[in-house]
Image: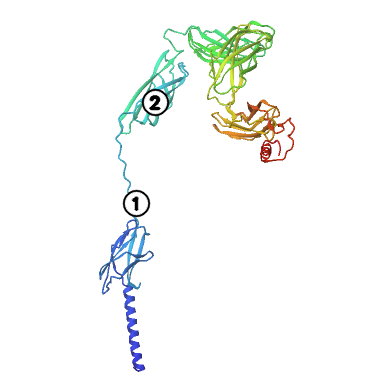
Amino acid sequence: MNERVKWLVASVLIAGAMCAGLVGIVAAQTPVLVEPDTLRTDQGGTVSIYATGTLTFSPTDTVRLVGYGILPTTYVNSTVLQATVPSGLAAGAHTLQVLDDVGGVIVTGTVTLVAPPAPTKTPKPKSPPPPGQPILTIRNYSVTPPQVRPGQEFTVAAEVYNNGSRAAENTMAVIPGGTFVPVGENGHFFGQVHINHTFVVSQRMRVPAGTPNGVHGLQIDLSANDYEGNHYDFPQTVVVEVVGGSSGTGADTGRPRVLIEDAATDPPVIAPGAPFTLTLRLANRGNRTAINVMVEADAAVVVPVTGGGIASVDIVRINEAATVTLPLLLKPGKEGGRQGLAITIEYGDYSGGSHSDQQTVGVTIDTSLANQPQLLIAAYQTTPEEISPGDSFTLTLELSNVGGGDAQRITLALGGEEGEKLGAFVPVGGGNVSFVPSVEAGEVETVALRLLVSGDAETKAHNLPVALEYDTAAGTREKDTQQVSLVVHRRPQFEISFYRPVEGTAMVGQPFPLPIEVINASSARFTVSKLEATGDRLEFLEEPSTYVGPLESGGSWTLDALAMAMESGPVDVIVNVHYVDDLNQTRVVSQVLTIEVMEMPNMEGPGGPIGPGFPEAPAEQPGFWGLVLRFLKGLLGLGS
């Protein structure tokens, strides 16, 4: 073939290739029909890809999701492919490509992934309305002042309580007045009042000038709705007492009369320079009500401890009484015994009258403080000296009278008067109170009480109050409270013994072992700082002590000591266990273990006895038995 023909053939082939490439490009850019074209991201699904125009598919074609990869592809026929889109992909438009068997793009399409809609909230079923209604009642009320006069203003305050089974809505309280005249707005709105809730309605009122004496009703109209719109009314009435008005028989007659019917001091016997409290019972024995009562003691005899020394009472009605107290201090003076104290009483009435009286009360003054008894717990002890939970013991108290007078009829109560502060201690064989007939001035009386420590008592110092009461020569009853401290220890139980037999092992002049063991038989852990062995007739060849540390309940520790005795007979081995108690104090528990030290046995040789105190046998030519004898002597330490 000549060159021209080759050129023509090459040109045809190149042109054909260019046409084929152009067809492929056109096919790859031709979109296809995708059904469905929209899927949910949480579900995914299968899409069908349909060829359009002259495009056809082959069984080797696959579908690619751009940005994800090849999808599972099913060849249906030459015009239809199916591909499965997985769930969990991002929402948005995604490109699908159909690839041939060598990875070339045949055609493209688009599928849109959308997010699932938000879940719809399930409405809660409505509960049926509860039955019942609100009920408003006045639980308590007050009138200020408690008694009013014609022409006077007063305030009434009522606490209203909803004791119904529904809340009160649009709650109102209206005070129309009636006998009395409202001052200001007489309607009050409170809105919603829940079940078992309260509110307070307060209204200022005025008493008309012509209002007669007596008790008058004041109406309070309460109203409310419930949540369904039902309306309820609750009319209520409170009472107001009017005094000082006209009784219909002419002008008022008489006057109040306030008398001191009872007086007492605390303490009953007072001393110069010492504070005391004067309590007075005031009674109105007149025929009019006393108001603004003022009480004051004689300033020449006493001075106030606090305040101005004046006690007041707002009102004392006819044949009623009131109690006032005055904190006072007796001025220095030389007169003792029963003395009079002047009291000035000033008061008024509702007619505007003013009245004043001066009365005298008797007080007992002791100017000789040296004659008063004074009891102290000078010393105390327990038997046994150390007590532990569960122990019974005797508490001995030394009661000393350091005052100048005799104390009579003395009661001594452990844990307070009622024994409420006994704590971990329980009286045994009697109560918590002991009686002592008397303790003269300067004398000491011993009181012994039997007690038991509770098994669960804490190991510490327990404060035990002791309440003292006694009579004085002046007839007064004195009270005092003092304290004693009782230390409760937790006592260990150590079992100390030899953990293997030692009989026959101890001989005079020879070292022998002391296999000592200590076992914690207590229910609690103890810290053992040292376990040691001692003895007067023993010589210890090694350190006869060891550190133990925390020893749990049921735990044990051993000490292997090596000792030697120079005399025969029984020898005491003293074992000391040093431990730290709950109060961080080092204590010792000791036990004596007795062993028997024997004499070294004598050995007979050919020339006589062999052993300590005997001369050695004369040397002989060692035969067979001689060698055996020398061997035995070497074992016994009697020769080589």
Residue identified by numbered label 2: 161
Q: Quadrant of the N terminus?
A: bottom left
Query: Which label number is shown at residue 596?
Result: none
Element type at mark 2: strand
Could you say which is closer to the camera, residue 267 or residue 436?
436
Q: Does residue 266 sit above or below 388 in this rendering?
A: above
* Mark 1–mark 2 CB contact (< 8 Å): no
Residue 584 appearing in the image: no
* Cα gap from disc 1 to disc 2, whole angstroms: 48 Å
Q: How is the image coloured?
A: rainbow
Residue type (three-letter) at the residue carrying disc 1: Ala
Residue type (three-letter) at the residue carrying disc 2: Tyr
Q: Nearer the viewer, mark 1 or mark 2?
A: 1
The earlier-in-sequence mark between 1 and 2 is 1
At horizontal 33% and vertical 84% (from top left) the residue drawn is: 15
Q: Quadrant of the C terminus?
A: top right
Q: Residue 205 lies in what quarter of the image?
A: top left
Q: Rate crowding at label 1 as few (under 14), some (14 to 19) or many (20 or more) other CA atoms within 10 Å.
A: few
Residue identified by numbered label 1: 118
Q: Does residue 69 sit above or below 494 in this rendering?
A: below
Could you say which is closer to the camera, residue 369 or residue 512?
512
The outermost residue toward the top is 338
Element type at mark 1: loop
